Image (tube, rainbow, N blue to C red):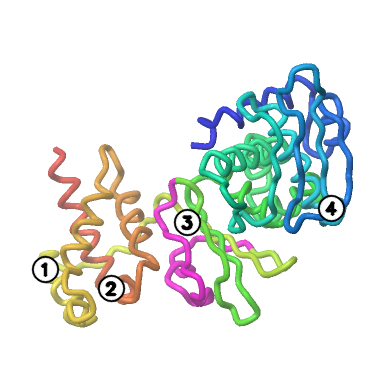
Amino acid sequence: MIDRWPEVGIARLIAQRHGFVPGESLLDLVRIYADVDFLHIPVQQVDGVSLHLKAKGRRPSIIVNSQIADTRAKFTLAHEFGHVLIPWHSGTIFSYSDSEKKTEGADNAYWEMEAEANRFAAELLMPREWLRAQVLEHQDPAHVLRVVLNLCGTSMAAAIIALNNALPPGYVYARTDDEGLVSNSMSSHGTYVKPFALGEKFAGSTRARESSACYNLNFKGTHHWLQYDSEKVPETVVDERPWRTIFDEIISDTNAVALQANIKHSINAIISTCNTKDISAQAFFTAVRQRMAGRDEVYDLILAHPLFNVFLQKKVAEFISRRT
């Protein structure tokens, strides 16, 4: 989805034209196109300003607030550089550190320009294809994040978002506080498992139990990446009963209907959704479990039932048999 943004394409074009790669001097690159100053900006929550954008006969100017942290200053410089290069950004643009603090009279067009400049900055500093190559090489999101922080010089928040956008399907990120409760969470694109809810306990969660690997980083907080297999072969259990009988037993044992009246219909709908063309039985089985993991308490109870895999294998087998 990120590839469709024109501002991302502009960032890639500029990097290719100048041979700019992570770790090189951003300031030297920006000064080819604009004047740059680092000054105290006496306006609350303004990180940077872009001046004379697309003004005839005027060279663009960028001011970065000298009072902000180095990592934020670097991203702000890249952000303002985006305003300079994105063709439809013109005039003078103030960039605020807190998007919730909107200026009087600011409209959606302004905030869309800010989002475009952010996407430009993220791609320039942390190119998606470069990040993908790092993931393929190291196979460990925690290690890749350390590489990004050391080489790209961006903030932790910006690096985590960029990394999540570059990860293949099958990853859920969670940051936890001192009590082990989730304070931030997101899933990579195409992942069936939903992100954690804020305040949810990470350790011992259904999402954690369903994962095939967990990568951790203790730096500026505690960070976790859960990885999920695309195909998980369940243990075969012999049970001659039809899936409907087994399903009814699971629902009865977990008292699921009392917790959610339409739970049987909901689970059948999830299973039907996962029945995509040419999907293998193993991938089908895995997709259903991952879609259910962490949805809420009733789904977790059903997933944990010792007969659920038996039911699901029979249900999947029935769907597969209808194709022939």
Q: Distance of mark 2 from mark 4, alpha carbons? A: 49 Å
Q: CA distance from mark 1 to mark 3?
A: 30 Å
Please tell me whether mark 3 sits on a helix, a strand or a loop.
loop
Three-letter residue code for mark 4:
Asp
Mark 2 or mark 3: name the one nearer the start of the chain.
3
Say which label, 1 or 3, has the lower sequence index.
Answer: 3
Magenta highlight range: 190-215
Is 303 in the magenta? no
Residue 234 at x, y percent in the picture: 34, 61
Percent across and percent down for residue 77 are 78, 41
Circle 4 residues within 10 Å: few <14, some 14–19, many ≥20: few
Q: What residue is disc 2 on?
A: 302
Cα–Cα span, label 1 and label 2:
18 Å
Q: Nearer the viewer, mark 1 or mark 3?
A: 3
Label 1 close to label 3 by CB (< 8 Å): no
Name the residue carrying label 1.
241
Is tag 4's residue or tag 1's residue first in the polypeptide sequence?
4
Q: Amino acid at mark 2?
A: Ile
Q: Secondary structure at mark 2?
A: helix
At horizontal 24% and vertical 59% (from top left) the residue drawn is 313
Nearer the N terminus, badge 2 or badge 4?
4
At horizontal 19% and vertical 59% (from top left) the residue drawn is 268
Disc 3 residue type? Tyr
For discs 2 and 4, the disc positioned in front in the rendered view = 4
User: Whole-Å distance between the Cαs marked 2 and 3?
Assistant: 19 Å
Q: Residue 198: within the magenta?
A: yes
- 10 Å neighbourhood of mark 3: few (<14), some, or many (≥20)? many
**Would you name the residue on which mark 4 appears?**
70
Q: Please name the residue shown 56% across and 48% down the image.
A: 105
* Disc 1 element: loop
Q: Nearer the viewer, mark 1 or mark 2?
A: 2
